Every structure is written in C-alpha cells, then in structure tokens.
Image (cartoon, rainbow, N blue to C red):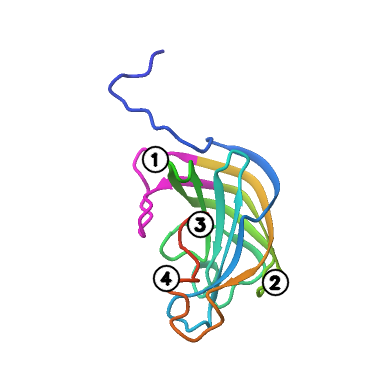
C-alpha cells in the first residue's frame, strides 16, 4: 500500500528500538553545581555516544524526583517522566549538530546506579527498558505531537567523574563559564 500523499512522514534519526547496547565509555561524566546552591548541591551528567554517533544522556538531580530526600545515591530508580522536575532524567539526541537534529526525553524505564561520587571517582549506571519520545529543544521539553519515539533495551555507561564549575562560592554554576550545559551531549 502506498503512503497517503496527504500525510507527512516523520524522519526519525533514532531507530524505533535498540537492543542491548552493552557497556559504553562515557562521553561526559560530570558533577555540576546546582544553580543558586553556592556549590552545596551537585547534579550529574553521564552521556555516551551510540554506534551511529547519536547520544544518550542520564542526568541525576538532587532534591527532586527520585532524589527528593536529598543527594544523588546509588540504587535502582524509575525514570522520572517530567522534564522540569526529574531527578532521574533520560535524554537522547539524534543527528546532533545537523538541521535534522531531534531531542528525546524518557517516558519510562529503570536506571541502576552502581557508583557515583566526587570528582576523580567512578560513575556507573545502567539504563534498562527505557522509552523516549521526541520533545522540543527549549527549556519546557514539550512532547512533539506525532513526533518520533525510541526504546533502549539496555545500555551501561561507565566513566570517571570530572567536577565542573568549581566547589562553591559564586552562584553555584548557573550558566557561566565552567558550568555544565543543560543540552544533550555538549
């Protein structure tokens, strides 16, 4: 059957599903200051480059979502599905740096964190049965109607934590030089 000429087909950079991707070395493994915390609270970025050059990223935020009680810790947690209040955020980007770039946000799955700590220590996390949908690239990360989606059966990402933004003083890493970007893979 021919596609309906009146319906525009989405071009999706990530496949609809990905099998077990194995263990990947971290593209970024960062511990970042939470903006406005004067360096007293830290969030983590752990990203990896997939086989086709696309990127998957895990963000771990203290005092919100799964970590509402305080600091980021080891354990197994459900993926938080609200992009503005997530503690365990799974994100991805396909065709990064091109006009066809699309951003995705997690809508389900589990994350097991086996190691997380200060700069110079190991960080390791496994994302299991994650589902992601295409979202806008602005701060709201709103789901795109009739957008792309993907599923990741499993991926483990290992790295060594690098402290970004200093240990305190100042504003605590709120977007100035040396702070962690809030985009995927940068």
Q: Which mark is residue 120?
A: 2
Question: Residue 137, position in %: x, y?
Answer: 38, 52
Q: Which mark is residue 169?
A: none
Q: Which residue is mark 3?
A: 186
Considering only order in the chain, which callout, 1 or 3, is on the residue closer to the N terminus?
1
Q: Which residue lies at the image location 50% right of the left edge and 52% below the top edge?
A: 106
Q: Residues within 10 Å of mark 1 (few under 14, many from 20)?
A: few
Q: Residue furthest left?
A: 6
Question: Residue 60, position in %: x, y?
Answer: 55, 66
Question: Residue 38, position in %: x, y?
Answer: 48, 84
Q: Which residue lies at the image location 43% right of the left edge and 59% below the top edge?
A: 83
Residue 64 position (above or below residue 133): below
Q: CA distance from mark 4 to mark 1?
A: 25 Å
Q: Are marks 3 and 4 in contact (CB under 8 Å)?
A: no
Question: Residue 57, position in %: x, y?
Answer: 55, 55
Considering only order in the chain, which callout, 1 or 4, is on the residue closer to the N terminus?
1
Q: Are marks 4 and 1 in contact (CB under 8 Å)?
A: no
Number of callouts: 4
Q: CA distance from mark 3 to mark 2?
A: 20 Å
Q: CA distance from mark 4 to mark 2?
A: 23 Å
Q: Residue furthest top?
A: 1
Q: Residues within 10 Å of mark 2 (few under 14, many from 20)?
A: few
Q: Are marks 3 and 2 in contact (CB under 8 Å)?
A: no
Instruction: Assess whether residue 143 is covered by the magenta stretch.
Output: yes
Taking 48 as reference, is 136 left or right?
left
Q: Which residues are magenta?
A: 131-149
Q: Which residue is mark 1?
A: 99
Considering only order in the chain, which callout, 2 or 4, is on the residue closer to the N terminus?
2
The kind of secondary structure element at disc 4 is loop
């Amino acid at each position: 059957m021919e596609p309906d000429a009146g319906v525009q087909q989405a071009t999706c950079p990530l496949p609809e599903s990905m099998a077990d991707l194995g263990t990947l070395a971290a593209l970024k493994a960062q511990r970042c200051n939470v903006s406005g915390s004067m360096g007293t609270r830290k969030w983590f970025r752990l990203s990896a480059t997939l086989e086709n050059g696309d990127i998957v990223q895990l963000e771990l935020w203290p005092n919100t979502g799964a970590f509402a009680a305080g600091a980021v810790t080891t354990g197994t947690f459900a993926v938080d599905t609200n992009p503005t209040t997530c503690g365990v955020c799974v994100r991805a980007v396909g065709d990064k740096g091109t006009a066809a770039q699309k951003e995705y946000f997690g809508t389900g799955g589990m994350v097991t964190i086996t190691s997380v700590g200060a700069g110079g220590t190991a960080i390791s996390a496994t994302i299991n049965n994650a589902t992601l949908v295409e979202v806008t690239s602005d701060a709201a990360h709103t789901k795109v109607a009739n957008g792309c989606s993907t599923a990741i059966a499993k991926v483990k990402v290992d790295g060594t934590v690098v402290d970004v933004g200093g240990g305190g003083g100042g504003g605590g890493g709120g977007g100035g030089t040396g702070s962690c970007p809030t985009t995927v893979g940068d």
